[in-house]
Amino acid sequence: MKLSHILIKNFRNIGNREILFKDKMMLNGVNGSGKTSIIEAAYISFTGKSFRTSNLKEIINKETNFFFVRTNVSDMSGYNREFSIGFDELGQKKILIDGNAATRKELMNVAVPVIHSPEDMEIISGGPKKRRDFIDKICFMENKSYFDDFIEYNRYVKQKNMLLKKGDAKTLSYINNAAVPLIKKIRDLRKTACSRINDEFRSYNSDIFPELELTISTQHDENIAEKLQSKIPREMEKGFALYGPHVDIISVKTALGESRTNVSMGESYLISLVLKMAELSLYSKKELYPVFFIDDIFVYLDKKRKTNLYEKIVELKNQVIMTSAIETSCDFKQISFLNIANGEK
């Protein structure tokens, strides 16, 4: 998949901007110049959501009442496609694929980006939600029905929360029992996804960070029906669901040699970046090559790590679009630099 062109209107601090992209490209410029906003706009046109905020209203330029993004890409099959997304202050979202109205699910079946940003360090050092999101994306890659499974599960949680507020224990027990197979399916898929990404990380990382051991694991097997039933009294008291895939703990264990388990910010950045590159490697086994966005690349890394990663990036079959406030050139001619204020060099 390749991104060739983007048109951005009224998006954060960007009023109106068009950019042509190359296969390996670095967007550089001072902080606040709009580098991250450009890749955020592209990401939204591919997925229908932002990697920076869950509230799309925050993105609308303060001087206007809507934003609009249009991208031109060659898809996974090599066909030229056009994606458009518009969103206004009333919360109305419109997605178009080749000029035809589409859903977010339809968009995600065509466009497959992978992104790494400094916030992804939370996969390593943060709470379980970021890890759930990461593993859920692997699940969707491995099994397209996972999207529908999770929508169905979210409907169950919403209905359950309504029943908890009403105190309807009888109906609650019924929908809990009905949800058991769905919960088991989601957990089984997550378990498989954790195993796949662990194997890929070990293989891919062997010559980048060989002293590192990393394992991502998910919920242990248990009697789901009994657990759902045992949680009802506490859930009735709280008024919302306390058990299930939406709150499952996905843990990560890291070790550098045998001396320590804690990692620095630089190490967290590198580990999470390599983890995303391992995700790309999983896609490549299906002969799929998503656009890889890297925001604020190398911000925590020394010169040796930078060179090693540049070498890996150049080797990728994927299009790679990066941003940096500090990188203005490199020794790899395959990488084009674009200062978003001053033009390409």
Image (spheres, rainbow, N blue to C red):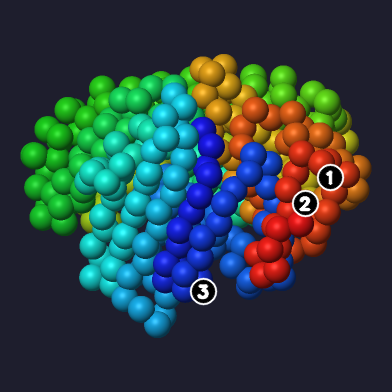
Whether the residues at callouts 1 and 2 have beta carbons within 8 Å, the answer is yes
Mark pair 3, 1: CA separation: 30 Å
The correct choice, above or below, for 118 with respect to 341 in the image is: above
Percent across and percent down for residue 78 are 46, 27
Answer left or right for 109 relative to 130: left
**Tag 1 secondary structure:** helix
Label 1: few (<14), some (14–19) or many (≥20) C-alpha neighbours in 10 Å: some
**Tag 3 secondary structure:** loop
Residue hosting label 3: 13
Mark pair 1, 2: CA separation: 6 Å
Residue hosting label 1: 306
Task: Say which residue appears at 46% left-offset and 40% top-offset.
Answer: 73
User: Could you say which disc has been placed on residue 159 in the image?
Assistant: none
Give the mark nearest the N terminus, 3 or 1. Answer: 3
Residue hosting label 2: 298
Give the mark nearest the N terminus, 2 or 3. Answer: 3
Answer left or right for 184 relative to 293: left
Percent across and percent down for residue 285 are 57, 17
Furthest residue in direction bottom, as rendered: 63
Answer left or right for 306 relative to 241: right
Label 2: few (<14), some (14–19) or many (≥20) C-alpha neighbours in 10 Å: many
Image quarter (top left, top right, bottom left or bottom right) of the C terminus? bottom right
Percent across and percent down for residue 67 are 37, 66
Mark pair 2, 3: CA separation: 24 Å
Choose top left, top right, bottom left or bottom right for residue 88.
Answer: bottom left
Task: Say which residue appears at 28% left-offset and 30% top-offset.
Answer: 149
